[in-house]
Each structure stands twice: as C-alpha cells, then as structure tokens.
Image (cartoon, helix red, strand yellow):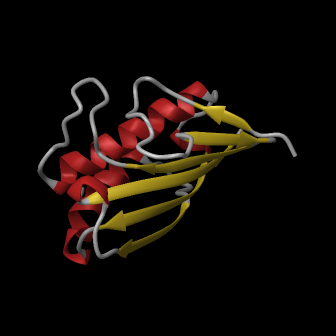
Amino acid sequence: MSKESIHSSAAPAAIGPYSQAVKSGNLIFVSGQLPIDAATGEMPSDIKAQTSQSIKNIESILAEAGATLDNVLKSTVYLADMELFAPMNEVYAEHFKSPFPARAAFAVKELPKKALVEIEVIASL
C-alpha cells in the first residue's frame, strides 16, 4: 500500500506528528480541521463562523489532492457541546450537497485550542 501526504498552505499546519491529509489509492483521509484561519492564525468566536472556517480548511486540503467537497464520502464532526449542533448543522448544510456524505456528530469533553468544532472527512477521487 502506498500513501502520500497532502499539504495545503491555505489550511493551518498540523499541530502534532500527523499529516493534514493522506492519500492512498483513490481515498483521501483529511485529519480533523480546527477552525483556524491559516493566514492570521486566528479562530472565530462563534460556532457558525468556526464551522465555516473548518470546512474552508477542508476544501483547501482537498483541492491539493484534486478533490472538492462533492468527493466527500464520510465526515465526523466533533463539538464542544451538543447545544451547538443546530447552528453547526445550518452551516454544514450550506456547504454540502445531496447526496450528502455519511456523517457522525458528537460532543467531546474538550477540543484543541478550546475550539467549538473540529471536522474530519474521508473523500474519494
């Protein structure tokens, strides 16, 4: 099995020993994306803006691999609190089209850098 690391300077750099994404065959595994603006290093304060920024980061990484959000098969959304689900879902629905990817969404105790949301995806070329 061969694997290739995918990196986009338009998305925040990995904050640990992992790749932004890994491509193996026709699959792309994008690591969880925090809502950090790569240009400024800043994170928006509200859940809607954070969700949009996380998805923008995913789009940048997928573009490096020759893919778009339309190629996403599965996503996992990590939330700091399930009360954030509805506003996150509103923004999520603006970015993904039918047929929608399979998805899991759940709350975790805490996210890195005190983010409200983190999103990871698996896409296929």
In the image, what residue occupies the spot 19% across and 75% down?
A: 83
In the image, what residue occupies the spot 54% across and 52% down?
A: 121
**Residue 13 at what x, y percent from top left?**
42, 34
**Residue 3 at what x, y percent from top left?**
77, 40
Could you say which is closer to the camera, residue 7 or residue 89? 7
| Relative vertical location of residue 83 with respect to residue 55 in this rendering, above or below | below
**Residue 6 at what x, y percent from top left?**
61, 32
Residue 44 sits in quarter = top left
| Relative vertical location of residue 108 with respect to residue 97 in this rendering, above or below | below
In the image, what residue occupies the spot 46% across and 46% down?
A: 16
Q: Residue furthest right?
A: 1
In the image, what residue occupies the spot 21% across and 58% down?
A: 114
Q: Is residue 80 left or right of residue 60?
A: left
Give the position of the C terminus as an image quadrant.
top right
Q: Residue furthest left?
A: 45
Numbered marks: total? 0
Q: Residue furthest front?
A: 17
